Structure formats: structure tokens, C-alpha cells
Image (cartoon, coloured by chain):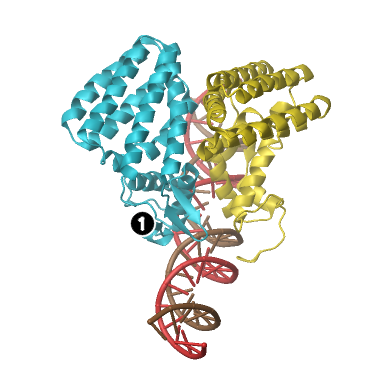
Chain colours: A yellow, B cyan, C red, D brown
Amino acid sequence: MQPGVREDRAINTSTVAQDPATLSDEVYRSLRSSIVKGEHRPNARLIEAELAERLQVSRTPIRDGLLRLASDGLVLSRRRGWVVREHTPEEISEIYGVRLALEGYAARLAAKVGDDEALAHIASVHHRGSDDVSRDARERLVDYNDLFHDAIVEAAGNRRLADLIRQNREYYFNYRIAALYSDEEASLSIAGHDELVRTLLARDGNAAEQAAREHVGEALTVILAKVR
Amino acid sequence: MQPGVREDRAINTSTVAQDPATLSDEVYRSLRSSIVKGEHRPNARLIEAELAERLQVSRTPIRDGLLRLASDGLVLSRRRGWVVREHTPEEISEIYGVRLALEGYAARLAAKVGDDEALAHIASVHHRGSDDVSRDARERLVDYNDLFHDAIVEAAGNRRLADLIRQNREYYFNYRIAALYSDEEASLSIAGHDELVRTLLARDGNAAEQAAREHVGEALTVILAKVR
DNA sequence: GTACACCAGGTTGCATGCAAGATTAGCGCA
DNA sequence: TGCGCTAATCTTGCATGCAACCTGGTGTAC
């Protein structure tokens, strides 16, 4: 392939390209998605040349993407060779600790400063989503969960907080993990959302933070049980 | 310069190199330090070729370093050209919101699960540091502040939380900002640490989280007043 | 049979070349 | 004099080549 010549590539470019999306950008999203969906399993080696071949780009954008993934903590650059990061139960607990702090605070903010419209949107997402999920595939659960937490974070109105939460979300609730949820556990999780929505609509910041923290704590318990 | 041949470079390699530190790594630290210390001012353009010339490396490790800095949020890749990120008062408030959530939670954890030794270490850092600072240069304030908050985060025992807090610290309290502090404001900040240490030693998690949040809130007030 | 050294293959770190696109400056025209 | 258009320059995005280093395997000595 000639430098500078844009051609069709084996990368899914369906994601909304904000700027003139670079190849590095697309590789980053593509790899992240592969990892989160479990196509690259933890501890799997990632060979730059192999990925370059598969995605039909040179090693440069692959390297850029891997560097960003390493910043996110999704891959690891061992002495020589990229590896999909495996998380020990301790690390999972730590990740959930961070999530607890961030999402708890986001819930508090949403209750305090979210406008009525934003709060109504949260409730609406919750009701639509929780119906869907209870009778549908596990994959939907992730999408609903993302939408729900996005709505809260949106209402909180702190963009940086939103970025951090979103960046971290892939760790603690992705497709790979969702597949492990039983129906009862999914229902329990949704029940936690119920309580959270209630406190938000009541605009009780303390209670909302508390509810969010408990919700996260319960999720951690479920996941730790699966991991062992 | 020949590929693969290691020579002396214009990069400060005094930092403890953990692994066989790569050039990219060194460039990253060097650039970050320059930005945080104000040698590259906000909105300044960063030219890859120029940096490569100055640090006596090729553009590749420069690009790697810039990518990592972009992940951290310290630089920005506009359409064509890297720029040191400038933060609006709104963004500063947002950053402090995140800090509030993270450091508050770290304080709560430290009070709850920190072992006696770790808590004693916090108190010791505080007493030594706060003496030093009150009669010494502003630059020391940053170093003391870092040590103090590191000690708390250490006691909290969550490595990921620690990484996030450290990664974000450069935004909200770096050398550039510290230079703006008056003596009174520095003292006020230290007074906030006093209260925090008290609650930690009392092992009162709620109070510690509360104290940390108030401390962060006060810092935000000071800084917003400076920025305007 | 075990341990050590050496050799070959694989994979990355870094340097560099090229072209596209952005930026800037200069020029002509209103 | 001000504004828009065009050409030249600047800067990056990407591809690619090379050498070092890591890894794994084989052979030899004890």
C-alpha cells in the first residue's frame, strides 16, 4: 500500500467520525472493541505485524492504538510483546473502588444540579431499558447499562467525570462479563437502578450517592463470585 | 544517528528507570515535566521535528510521548499540530470535581483500612512538611503536597485509585499554579491538612471524606480567583 | 540426566521518507 | 485600503527498513 493513499480498509468505520478520523483512531476503537467483546482473551499476545495484516494498515497506526490502549490499561507492554491485560480479583476490586467513588459522586451531582429534563430522561431510559432486558439477550443488558449510566453522568454535567467513568466502564461491565450474569443477577442489578432513580427524582444527593455506591458494591460481589 | 544505537541524549534520565526504559518513556516524562513546570505555556504549539531536534531523538518517540500526553489530557492534537492544553475556569472546576470524588474516597478508605503505620506516616509527612513550607519557597509546597497526598493514597491501598489521582494531580496543583499562592493561602491549605490528619487518626471515615472534600473545595476557590 | 551456552527465529524500538492536508504569505482586484 | 484567491511552505499521518533484544530450542559438557 502506498503512503498517503486512502483505500477501503478492514476496519469498521461505522462509528461517527468526529474529525477527519485518523487510521490510528480507527485502529484504537477496533482493537478496544475486540478486547472488550472477548475476541482477544486476557493474556493473549498481540503481534503488531499480525494486527497490521488483519486490519490492512501498517504497523504505525497499530502501535499508536496499542499505546492508547495501554494508557487505558487494557493492554500491557511486557518486555517485548503486547498482552491483553488480565485482572486479578484484587485489581477488579480496586477498579470497582474507583467506580464507586466516581459514580457515587456523579449521582450526587445529578441529584443536586441536574435539570428536570435530564432526570426525566434517566427515568425514561431506565423504564424502557429494564423492560427490554428482562426478556432479551444478555448483550442488551450492557447497552442498557451504558445508556443508563451515561444519562446520570450527563445530568451531573461534568464532562471530565463523564470521560473518566466511560473510560473505566469497559473494565467493570463489558460484554464478556455480562455473559456471566444469571437472570436473577440481572434483575437484582436493575432493582438497584430502581432505587437510584427514586433518590434522584427526590433530589436527595446523599441518598443518591449512597444508592449508587451500594449498587456498585453489589455488582462487585456478583463478579468476584464469577471470577473465582 | 543510527537506528538502534544507544547514545547519550539530551533527556534527563535521572528518574529511576524501572524496566529498560524506552526513549518514548523518557520523552514522555521529559515533556510532561516541561509542561507542568510551565516551560511550555498553555496554547503553545509543539512541533514534533523541533522537539526531536532538541531532545536528540527521532520523531517516533516524540509522537509516542505526545500520544500519551494526549491521553492524560495535557496536550491536544488539533487538526494538524499539537497544542499544550489550556483549561477554562469551567474545566478547572470539573477537574476539581473529579479530584473531590477521588481524594474524598481515598481519605475514607485510608481512615477505614489504612494500617497504623501508614497513618502515622501521613502525620509525620504532614508535620515535617508543613514546617518546611511555611518559611520556604513556593516550589517546596508542591513537593510537600504531593508527598502528603501520596501518603494518604498509599494508606488507602488502592493502586488504581492512586494512579488516577496521581495522573490528575498535575492539572490541579502543579508548579505553575503553586507560584500563584500567597503565604496566607498556603497556610490555609495546610490548615485543611491539619483537620484531615485529625479525622484520619480518629479513623472516622465519614469525617475524613468530608474534610478532604472541603479541602479540595477551598483549593478550587483559591485557584478560580487567580484564574479570573 | 541436568545445566549451561550458543544459535536461530521472531518481535519490537527507533529512524526516516513521502505525500496529503493545513497554514501562511503574497498578490491581484474591488 | 481591505478582501479573497492562489501558491509555497510547514507539519503531520502513515509506511517501511534496520538492528537490538527476547525467546525457544538444540547441542555439549559434566
Query: For this view, does B139 lie left or right of residue A107?
Result: left
Q: Which residue is mark 1?
A: B56
Is residue A21 positioned above or below A171 on the image? below
Outermost residue, left side: B135
Q: Is A45 or B101 nearer to us in this picture? A: B101
- Quarter residue B45 falls in: bottom left
Q: In this picture, is B25 found above or below A219?
A: below
Q: Residue at x 53, y 19 (%)?
A: A206
Query: Seen in the image, is B168 located left or right of residue A107?
Result: left
Residue pictured at 45% horizontal, 56% vertical: B82
Say how many tags the image has: 1
Q: Report if residue A49 is visible in the image.
A: no
In this view, the residue farthest toward the right is: A135
Compared to residue D30, the image places residue A79 above or below, namely: below
Residue B223 sits in quarter: top left
SS category of the residue bearing label 1: loop
Residue B112 screen position, x and y as percent: 45, 12
Q: Is residue B81 visible?
A: yes
Quadrant that contains the C terminus of chain B: top left
Q: Position of residue B21 (x, y in %)?
A: 42, 41
Where in the figure is residue A172, as x and y percent of width and height? Answer: 62, 28
Q: Looking at the figure, which quarter contains the N terminus of chain B?
A: bottom left
Q: Position of residue B55 (x, y in %)?
A: 35, 54
Q: Nearer the viewer, residue B226 or C2?
A: B226
What residue lies at 29% left-to-right and 34% top-to-bottom? B142
In the figure, A10 relative to A186: above or below? below
- Identify which amino acid the numbered label 1 is placed on: Gln
Q: With B38 as the anchor, is A3 left or right in this view?
A: right
Which is more toward the observer, B108 or B214?
B214
